[in-house]
Image (tube, helix red, strand yellow):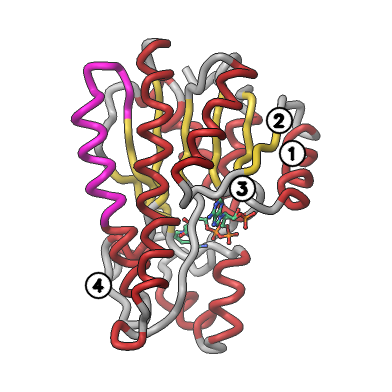
Amino acid sequence: MFDLKGKVALVTGGNGGIGLGMARGLAKAGASIFVAARNEEKSAAAVQDLQSLGAEAFAVQVDVSDEKSVGEMVTTIVRQCSSIDILINNAGMNIRKQPQDLPLAQWRQIMDTNLTSAFLCARDVYPHMKRSGSGKIINIGSMLSIFGVSHLPAYGSSKGGLVQLTKSLAVAWAMDNIQVNAVLPGWIDTDLTRTANEKDPTLYERILGRTPAGRWGSIDDLAGVAVFLACRASDFITGTTVVVDGGYSALC
Ligand code: NDP
């Protein structure tokens, strides 16, 4: 039920952080992985990491905020493997600014990278999943899909939007046997949060004190949920969100 042998997975932003954690889970379950990101050096290292787990792994360069680049990525993968069975829309970024200080260009950059990218990747992968008769799409939201933070207005909007996109795609493609779900990670130790910790020296302890599990998450904490939402065990689960946060969002 949890076996992914013979499946092809595309993980955007799979060259580090949460994307790599999820890719490792899929790799250990037997899937072939395409790591899709901009930085070729980081992607090559991630591919080696995944190959060391015994998986077939490849890098494909993409800017997920660019429609043409996404189209070319999907064509490249399908030419090589003929199908894409699992799509993880994980690539993302943030810019920390109060709403009154956020230029439109940066708002658009965040929305394009975090939200429009997921729509583009899903739209372009859809015909291939439909043709093969099944598919799994996993969108990576955030605690900011639920909560508001004053200095992350565009990030929060993009992550809230991802939950609604998840529901729309799930409803649209349920009859095609394509399940679409979202994962909302809590505070995970990655490059993204390392930068946040550098900018706000009190952040680390504040999160620790507010997380019932008493620790920050590691990228390995995301491996299991990726496998579950990518395998047959979740075939009747669609349009929902799974929170992976050590209890952060359950605490009042
Ligand atoms: P990282 O900064 O480690 O990873 C971000 C990834 O996205 C990188 O692999 C980067 O690769 C890729 N990426 C960014 N922009 C683009 C682009 N335009 N085109 C292609 N790839 C791109 O951060 P995390 O692992 O922490 O974040 C991964 C996801 O998880 C994000 O969506 C983030 O919002 C979300 N998240 C993270 C949390 C955390 O606590 N860490 C909590 C909740 C959600 P490259 O630079 O090579 O393009």
Residue at position x 56%, y 42% in the image: 22
- Report the mark closest to the observer, 3 or 2: 3
Secondary-structure class at tag 2? strand
Sequence-earlier tag: 3 or 4: 3
Residue denoted by label 2? 57
Does mark 3's beta carbon lie closer than 8 Å to ligand 1? Answer: yes
Q: Are marks 3 and 2 in contact (CB under 8 Å)?
A: no
Residue denoted by label 1? 47
- The answer to whether residue 28 is above or below residue 24 is above
The numbered disc on residue 37 is 3
User: Is residue 21 shown to the viewer in this render?
Assistant: no
Does mark 2's beta carbon lie closer than 8 Å to ligand 1? Answer: no
Is residue 165 highlighted in magenta? yes
Sequence-earlier tag: 2 or 4: 2
Sequence-earlier tag: 3 or 1: 3
Give the residue type at disc 2: Ala
